Image: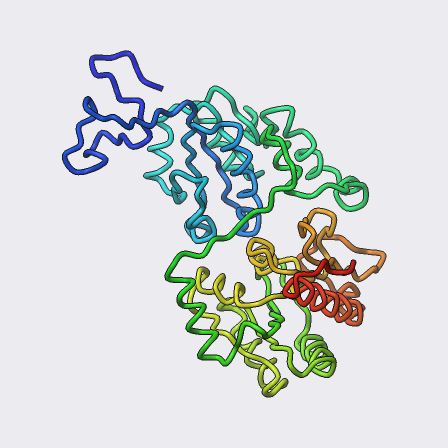
């Protein structure tokens, strides 16, 4: 990466050209240089859940390129999802300044994962010896940049393939897109020390103990696809069914700012059966509340991805989206409505059979199985399948 000019830039991970990596340390006398063999850029901007799924690539990248320096470019709202990840050397928010910075660098590998025009155009503009993912044609069409991206590309153009024939998960597909080996790596969310302490204090103040089994209900979803959430009545019915099964269960409401009124309504209808967590404290605090649970019930939404990233037993129901694309990594169950028109990926629908005919008994049974799994794990036993 060094240029042949009058100054030889030190080949070291810590060198910035602005100040010493440590006070009074001089590069020429350093006895612990950290050379970089590959500079790698990952661009993943769209949809927070997709950004988190893309983070599953990181372990494979670092295993294949152990002496690499990895930069991740994403939208500012997704930055909290990448916090504390040991495989990322630098995270940059999508901005004019950072696009200018990256435009002046030269990368060994660039991985562009979004099928969006501006992301693809930016990927075209960058200097990289190897480009994976998606760029832009001279006529402004999104195109694959490598053979590994072909299946991913076709999946977006062929509804029959996407809705009915595909049996592969997104995580598997994006590894192929990036030309990286895939052996079942889960994407991960990692709490820092302050978050761990907050979790401990909040659970103690709420009367939760380590012996409790906590079932969290992620009640909302993105406004982009508003029909990825159950009705208030369905949530209330399911919670009362679970309380009848085991009054000792702790039922926790989870969600974001847009779910505040909805969760309050559910909490009011359920009385003392539920613990209502705050919804307006930001994404990282929401991650902490999800981590207080053992089992999470959710639609195909960011809340589901948070639960998966934290290793929770996750019960997910699907209607408009594709169940095959989601990997629960052996910890959870998928429930489909089973109606003839699913999946469809429609943003609005006058019928909504996939929601109204959602089999609550199947979700209930999946949660009960999850409770058995948690109990078996705590007892040091192998859970029954």
Viewer-side residue, 373 vs 335: 373
Name the residue furthest bottom: 271
Residue 264 position in % (x across, y down): 55, 80
Viewer-side residue, 16 vs 353: 16
Residue 68 position in % (x across, y down): 43, 29
The answer to whether 193 appears left or right of 52 in the picture is: left
The answer to whether 190 appears left or right of 162 in the picture is: left
Residue 317 lies in what quarter of the image? bottom right
Residue at (64%, 81%) from the top-left corner? 248
Name the residue furthest front: 380
Q: On the rendered image, what quadrant is the N terminus found in?
A: top left
The answer to whether 348 appears left or right of 191 in the picture is: right
Q: On the rendered image, what quadrant is the C terminus found in?
A: bottom right
Name the residue furthest left: 24
The answer to whether 20 appears left or right of 222 in the picture is: left
Residue 26 position in % (x across, y down): 17, 28
Residue at (23%, 35%) from the top-left corner? 21
* Up-down relation of residue 345 to residue 239 (above or below): above
Residue 198 position in % (x across, y down): 40, 68
* Up-down relation of residue 303 to residue 364 (above or below): above
Residue at (70%, 58%) from the top-left corner? 332
Viewer-side residue, 297 vs 186: 186
Residue 108 lies in what quarter of the image? top left
């Amino acid at each position: 990466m060094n240029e042949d000019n009058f100054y030889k830039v030190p080949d070291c991970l810590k060198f910035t050209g602005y100040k010493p990596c440590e006070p009074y340390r001089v590069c020429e006398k350093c006895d612990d240089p950290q050379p970089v063999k590959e500079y790698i850029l990952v661009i993943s901007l769209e949809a927070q859940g997709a950004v988190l799924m893309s983070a599953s690539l990181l372990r494979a990248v670092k295993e294949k390129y152990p002496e690499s320096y990895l930069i991740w470019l994403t939208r500012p709202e997704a930055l909290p999802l990448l916090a504390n990840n040991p495989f990322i050397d630098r995270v940059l928010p999508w901005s004019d300044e950072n696009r200018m910075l990256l435009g002046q660098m030269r990368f060994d590998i660039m991985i562009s994962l979004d099928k969006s025009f501006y992301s693809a155009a930016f990927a075209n503009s960058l200097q990289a010896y190897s480009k994976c993912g998606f760029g832009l044609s001279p006529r402004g069409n999104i195109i694959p940049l490598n053979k590994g991206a072909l299946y991913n590309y076709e999946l977006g153009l062929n509804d029959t393939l996407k809705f009915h024939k595909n049996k592969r998960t997104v995580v598997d597909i994006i590894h192929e897109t990036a030309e990286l080996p895939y052996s079942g790596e889960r994407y991960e969310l990692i709490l820092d020390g302050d978050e761990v302490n907050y979790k401990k204090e909040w659970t103690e103040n709420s009367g939760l103990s380590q012996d409790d089994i906590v079932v969290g209900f992620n009640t909302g979803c993105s406004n982009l696809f508003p029909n990825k959430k159950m009705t208030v009545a369905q949530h209330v019915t399911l919670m009362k069914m679970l309380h009848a099964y085991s009054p000792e269960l702790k039922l926790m409401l989870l969600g974001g700012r847009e779910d505040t009124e909805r969760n309050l309504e559910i909490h009011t209808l359920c009385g003392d059966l539920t613990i209502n967590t705050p919804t307006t404290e930001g994404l990282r605090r929401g991650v902490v509340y999800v981590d207080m649970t053992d089992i999470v019930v959710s639609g195909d939404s960011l809340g589901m991805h948070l639960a998966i990233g934290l290793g929770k037993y996750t019960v997910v129901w699907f209607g408009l989206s594709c169940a095959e694309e989601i990997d629960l990594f052996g910890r959870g169950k998928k429930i489909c409505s089973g109606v003839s028109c699913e999946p469809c990926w429609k943003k609005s629908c006058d019928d909504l059979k996939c929601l109204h005919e959602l089999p609550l008994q199947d979700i209930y049974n999946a949660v009960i199985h999850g409770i058995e799994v948690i109990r078996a794990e705590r007892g040091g036993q192998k859970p029954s399948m």
